[in-house]
Image (cartoon, rainbow, N blue to C red):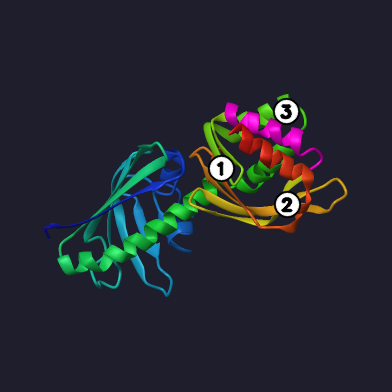
Amino acid sequence: MELNQMLERTIVICAERPIVFRYFTDSKRWASWWGEGSTIEGKTGGKVLICYPGGTTASGEILEISQNERVVFSYGYDSGKPIPAGSSKVTITVRDHPEGTELKLVHEIADASVRDMHIQGWKYQLALFANIVCKEQHAGYSQLLDDYFSMWNLSDANSRKQMLERITSPDVRFKDAYGCVSGREDFSTHLSAAQQYMPGLTLMRQGDPMQCQGTAMTRWVAKRTDGTEAARGTSMFHFTPNGQIKSIVGFWMPSKFLISDFRLKSFYCRLKCDS
């Protein structure tokens, strides 16, 4: 049977290439993508089994595999419909990308109508895949966000610098209503200004954060030494493939506290005058 119909899809995943490729050699990870009972043998001739929700199964075997680069396997449904087991070919290639890993999928099928049936399915499955991989790559992101907020509270300049270098990329960007900085040195100056003009405030994460494909969102609150609230808001974080913070965008919630706090007003006025 000639496989002359082709479906192609390319995505970029915010994760390192070896972590992405593990999902094609490790049955536990493979099953976390496709569903309980799914298995894969990461070698040429190894069996491939996909267990879809509802009991439908698909199977094939690995035709070619190159570690951290490429995997090719046959694919089809054990019921024989819409295509028999092993009667089509899936090629997945991964390569480094500035934002992580570029994954290209090519599905070769004999029939155009069957190809078209799989277009939306692969869009959905690759979105699931990207989320699952990023969940593993950025498993410690909650602690990373806590470290970020605690960095604002450090009065010692050396401690702030060490934290900044550990948790952010060299070209980190920060934006909010009162700041627009680029790079660690610029960010470090901004943090120093916060210590000077907002002494005694403690910034902390509030509630559970959320993460999707290398982007996280969380609420935060700033409190005075007496425990009263000075400000609150929400911040978006974008991560590097290796788990550092690449950029932050902060959104301040309109609050009566900002209006009543002279020190905060002085800080923001100073920032505006210096910009």
Q: Position of residue 104 (x, y in %)?
A: 30, 47
Circle 2 sits on which residue?
258
User: What is the x, y in percent for residue 134?
Assistant: 50, 49
Q: Is there CB contact under 8 Å for labels 2 and 1?
A: no
Q: Is residue 275 left or right of residue 78?
A: right
Query: Residue 149: horizontal and vertical position, in percent?
Result: 69, 43
Judged by its main secondary structure, the magenta piece is helix
- Name the mark on residue 159: 3
Is 64 displayed left or right of 224 in the figure?
left
Amino acid type for the residue under numbered disc 3: Ser
- The residues bearing labels 1 and 3 have C-alpha atoms spaced at a distance of 22 Å
Task: Note whether 129 is above or below 237 in the view shown.
Answer: below
Q: CA distance from mark 2 to mark 1?
A: 18 Å
- Residue 181, by quadrant, is top right
Residue occupying image coordinates x 61% and y 43%: 178
**Residue furthest out toward the right:** 226
- Which span is picked out in magenta? 185-201
Q: Is residue 255 above or below residue 196?
A: below
> Which mark's residue is nearer the viewer, 2 or 1?
2
Q: Earlier in the sequence, mark 3 or mark 2?
A: 3
Number of numbered callouts drawn: 3
N-terminal of the pair, mark 2 or mark 1, is 1
Query: Would you call the spot at circle 2 few (<14 residues within 10 Å), some (14-19), or many (20 or more)?
Result: some
Name the residue tied to disc 1: 175
For label 3, count other residues whose C-alpha is less than 10 Å away and answer few (under 14), some (14-19) or many (20+): few
Q: Is residue 197 left or right of residue 133?
A: right
